[in-house]
Amino acid sequence: MEQAAAAAAVQAEPNKKKKKTIHKKHLPLLIMMIPGLLYLLFNNFLPMLGIVIAFKDINFAKGILQSDWVGFDNFEYLFKTSDAYIITRNTILYNLVFIILGTVLALGCAILLNEIKNKVLLKTYQSLITLPHLISMVIVSYLVYAMLSGEVGFINRTVLPWLGIEEGISWYSEAKYWPVILTLVHFWKGVGYSSIVFFAALLGIDEEYYEAARLDGASRWKQITHITLPSIMPIIILMSLLSVGRIFYSDFGLFYQVPMNAGALFETTATIDTYVFRGLSGGGDMGMSTAAGVYQSIVGFILVVLANYSVRRYSKDNALF
């Protein structure tokens, strides 16, 4: 027995030394993680304690903890409002268009960039297509106003007369035009920036695959469909899943600033985010605003799980978890 115990101790000693060596090896990496972990803790996890506000009638004189508990009354108010259907419909439909069509456009843009072999032209085009993303949405809203203004707008004063239409369009009082306008503005501003991720993934594809395909007589289209797209499919799925998780969120600047907060356009420009902001700035209802945020987060989480489950059934390797 003593000999067996001694042998076990001898075997355990190298394992302990190995574990200490591994810890020392990764110690710099663990230290480098600390700032990121602290950021996640204070910026992402601690604020989640504020979920309690969604179930209370906040009275700042009493404080958050001492305010009256109202249960699901804030959620009931949110869903019983006459505008609940409009804001939910707009939020979902706009984001579905942005996800599906935006992915296609960003992917196409990345493929076109990948076809440019001249480095100077490549850098120039990259700068031009990503520049709109760096422009503030407030500035974008005034650029759109310069195009659509009823009195001095470029379209009403130049484009429509050139097309033989003498009577101008009151863009900021007719809601039917704004689904197209907002979609165009969104893609103009964001497609170039979104294509960066796909372009980076394209750079990782081995050029030998394309050389072999060209030797076999494959056309450019077949190279894209049989090499390019399958190679970056995990990135496409990952970006789509992340977008699905935020399908109940909207670009606040796009839907609030660009339409100039015009009440006549509410039917096609109001989303959950803008509705909450109007309610909070107008009535100061902190509980209802938090309830809307909780509603968005829970539905987003469920959608990510369902989307990931669907992807996992098709391909386990491409699923997030």
Image (spheres, rainbow, N blue to C red):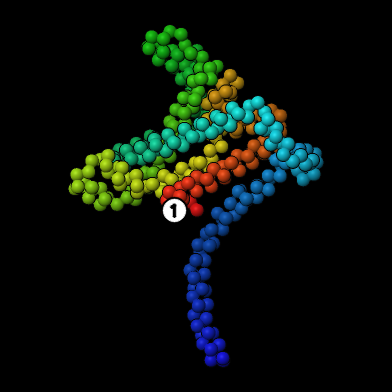
Q: Which residue is mark 1?
A: 316
Q: Residue furthest top?
A: 166
As displayed, is residue 152 above or below residue 98?
A: above
Asked where in the image residue 130 lies, by quadrant, the reply is top left
Lateral position of residue 155 relative to residue 112, left or right: right
Q: Residue furthest front?
A: 313
Asked where in the image residue 62 lies, by quadrant, the reply is top right
As displayed, is residue 170 above or below residue 42?
A: above
Q: Residue furthest bottom?
A: 2
Q: Residue 69 placed where, x, y %? A: 77, 41
Query: Which residue occupies 39% across, 37% down?
Result: 104
Query: Which residue occupies 42% across, 34% down?
Result: 101
Of helix, strand and loop, which one carries label 1? helix
Query: Which residue occupies 25% across, 52% down?
Result: 208
Query: Which residue occupies 46% across, 8% down?
Result: 167
Q: Residue 215 placed where, x, y %? A: 19, 48
Front in this rendered view, residue 279 or 118: 279
As displayed, is residue 102 above or below residue 216?
A: above
How many callouts does the rendering have? 1
Quadrant containing the N terminus in the rendered view: bottom right
- The reply to whether residue 130 is visible in this rendering is no
Disc 1 crowd rating (10 Å Cα; few below 14, some 14-19, many 20+) is few
Lateral position of residue 256 relative to residue 196, left or right: right
- The reply to whether residue 77 is visible in this rendering is yes
Q: Residue 131 placed where, x, y %? A: 42, 35
Q: Residue 13 placed where, x, y %? A: 52, 81
Lateral position of residue 143 relative to residue 78, left or right: left
Lateral position of residue 227 relative to residue 160, left or right: left
What's the amino acid at mark 1? Answer: Lys
